[in-house]
Amino acid sequence: MSETVIVAEIFGQNVFNDAVMRERLPKSVYKKLRKTIVEGTELDPSIADSVAQAMKEWAVERGATHYTHWFQPLTGVTAEKHDSFISAPDSTGKVMLEFSGKELVKGEPDASSFPSGGLRATFEARGYTAWDCTSPAFLKEDAAGVTLCIPTAFCSYTGEALDKKTPLLRSMQALDQQALRILRLFGNTTSKKVTPSVGPEQEYFLVDKAKYLQRKDLIYTGRTLFGAMPPKGQEMDDHYFGIIRERVGSFMREVNKELWKLGVSAKTQHNEVAPAQHEIAPIYAEANIATDHNQMVMETLKRVAERHGMICLLHEKPFAGVNGSGKHNNWSITTDDGINMLNPGATPHENIQFLLVLACILKAVDVHADLLRQSAADVGNDHRLGANEAPPAIISIFVGEQLEDVIDQLCSTGEATHSKQGGKLMTGVATLPDLDKDATDRNRTSPFAFTGNKFEFRMVGSSDSISSPNVVLNTIVAEAFKEAADELEKAEDFDLAVHDMIKEMLAAHKRIIFNGNGYSDAWVEEAEKRGLPNIKSMVDAIPALVTDKAVKLFEEFGVFTRAELESRAEIEYETYAKAINIEARTMIDMASKQIIPAVIKYTTQLAKSISAVKGACPDADVSVQNELLTESSDLLSETKVALASLTELDQKACQMEEGREQAVYYHEVVVPAMEALRAPVDKLEMIVDKELWPMPSYGDLIFEV
Ligand code: ADP
Ligand code: MG
């Protein structure tokens, strides 16, 4: 047995959290900092030195030698540049350990190598990182030692956001302001701040490292570009919630321990639907912290997996034919005094504030479905969305039976008089307790589902940051709140006005509600009739970022400028093109250097054995061998042709100028050429001798972890 983990003792031990700050900071400094963190007021720059001093002492006591501003550039992963605490040696050769307020508050990484989408020419390399005191500093322990990590925002010299955090913080501010207006309208005078709460459920795959290293596709692209289905996939449903294997169990145990030390409240873990697929979910937190924590979760999963001789794959679709991985972004709106604005209560038909909030969310999602869809677009997610394992690419909302009924009452008669209740679940067994049922069943196929007191946005890809979806959710709902508050604040008869407003909004945006099976073809048709957009790919989703509607929305709430949106769109096109180019080149490499030689070896051996048999016994029946030889030779020439075509098309794509046209070309021309190469190769894998096949099969990868 391994050592005992005492959760309460280790939880948050590597975090410069509130308890540590209260203990170590001078009282006046603590109070000022706390006010900024809790109330969102401006940070008083005069406290920086004192906080830096306390932070350094705390970190050094715990073995830290370095510090880093930890930020989230538009590469999708986190960035850090470590500096040690040491000063220049004095005349006696001794060094001091230093960390000033200035170093805490501001960093200046050379920004020229991070994506900026044309916001910054490479010769204008200046970028700044700015301390985000609302997300606590933490210590990272790894092979590099112990490093003090300071969460920061990353902006250009001219103040444009170059990262995922800045817009998120801006959108939280917008939601805070507008949500408070709604609360005040309903007589709430006590809540001071409203924040979006987010709980991201993270799916991932684990594969054996030694096998991984034999697959160039996994190494370079994070997914398999070739691979025939094993005899067994996920059809038996025996992996979901199955018993966790020992090796995986010890990995999960260590992941939890590491995360708890970092103050990440890892809560739920289980096997997912596909073999070798798992999930981890923390307890929800403020959107900004949840986003930082999710980055730490992804990093920790990867790091700990290697210690256990495994590799954690966060790609959205590492294996064709079995489910891919997503990230469910659970989202609600909470006040500083603990009110969840998405809590309908037992009788939602009487809860006018909730109905208004709900109507605003329906409106926001209906009006900005394209933006929400875009926020979940990444290269890997193109393989999942709309592929009957994840929500379709059409945005709709599941509200459940109870709320649908209330909405129907309001829309048909203008009054809602009752709310359906869940009742009791009768098990029919005397010794089992009868359970109170929820008022509504779940729906697994909806991209945006109301689940009791929160919405679950299920489209997000497993490798993606959850920043973008939350930026969009916060901002579009802030807009709907603003439009409602603008009108209601002026109303002479508030009760009447709010009642009419809810009815009108529900009637106008009801088309976004869909409670049925989102995986069915009938829904695709129905959605089209309703005029809901069905945006099938990342390349098709990107333009949503720069429509007039989007620019107006984001500029109004100070979340993005037009230039920032344009730069983000540009980065997305480049990212797409680069990722597909790497995949295409990897396929070309594997096909020419590994697969074709293996098939030639096989056909040569087969041909030799046919002649040997014939030589020994001229009457022997070698028709089966001949058939195999013909079949594999035909597939081999098909492979060769597809390889030549992919090579040519990829070269053409490479020569195009970066931007939308190039990305569209990759999507519409290069991707089909990749599929055309994969098809004969997967068939060959089923024919060629396993010993000759140059890489581990799907079966080896997903069933033998
Ligand atoms: P599921 O049954 O949907 O798989 P999980 O337990 O795996 O649920 O994950 C649900 C996630 O939703 C958790 O991260 C949980 O903390 C989070 N969550 C719960 N309540 C809220 C809320 N009010 N706001 C935001 N997130 C929430
Ligand atoms: Mg879950």
Image (spheres, rainbow, N blue to C red):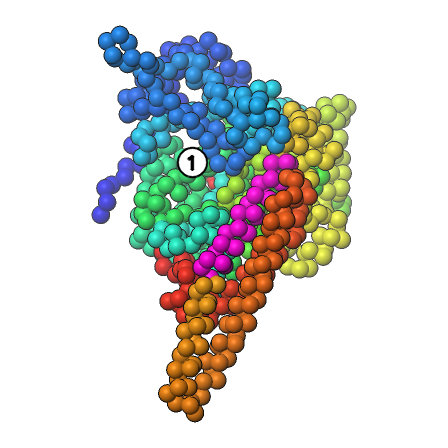
- Return the residue nearer the eye: 247 or 307: 307
- Displayed quadrant of residue 141: top left
- Tell me: 51 left or right of 108: left
- Amino acid type indicated by mark 1: Met
Q: Residue furthest front?
A: 615
Over which residues does the magenta segment extend?
A: 569-595
* Vertical relation: 161 (above or below) 696: above
Answer whether residue 580 is magenta in the image: yes
- Return the residue nearer the eye: 333 or 107: 107
Mark 1: few, some, or many residues within 10 Å (few <14, many ≥20)? some
The number of numbered discs placed on residues in the rendered structure image is 1
Query: Residue at the location (73% across, 25% down)?
Result: 486
Query: Residue at the location (75% across, 23% down)?
Result: 490
Disc 1 CB within 8 Å of nearest ligand 1 atom: no
- Displayed quadrant of residue 491: top right
Residue 406 rendering spot, x and y as whole percentages: 67, 45
| Residue corresponding to mark 1 | 296
- Displayed quadrant of residue 566: top right
Answer whether residue 242 is magenta in the image: no
Query: Residue at the location (43% across, 16% down)?
Result: 103
| Residue 396 visible | no
* Vertical relation: 420 (above or below) 432: above
Residue 10 rendering spot, x and y as whole percentages: 31, 33
* Image quadrant containing the C terminus: bottom left
* Vertical relation: 338 (above or below) 318: above
Residue 44 rendering spot, x and y as whole percentages: 49, 11
Query: Residue at the location (44% across, 24% down)?
Result: 69
| Residue 653 visible | yes
Residue 667 rendering spot, x and y as whole percentages: 63, 50
**Secondary structure category for the residue under label 1:** helix
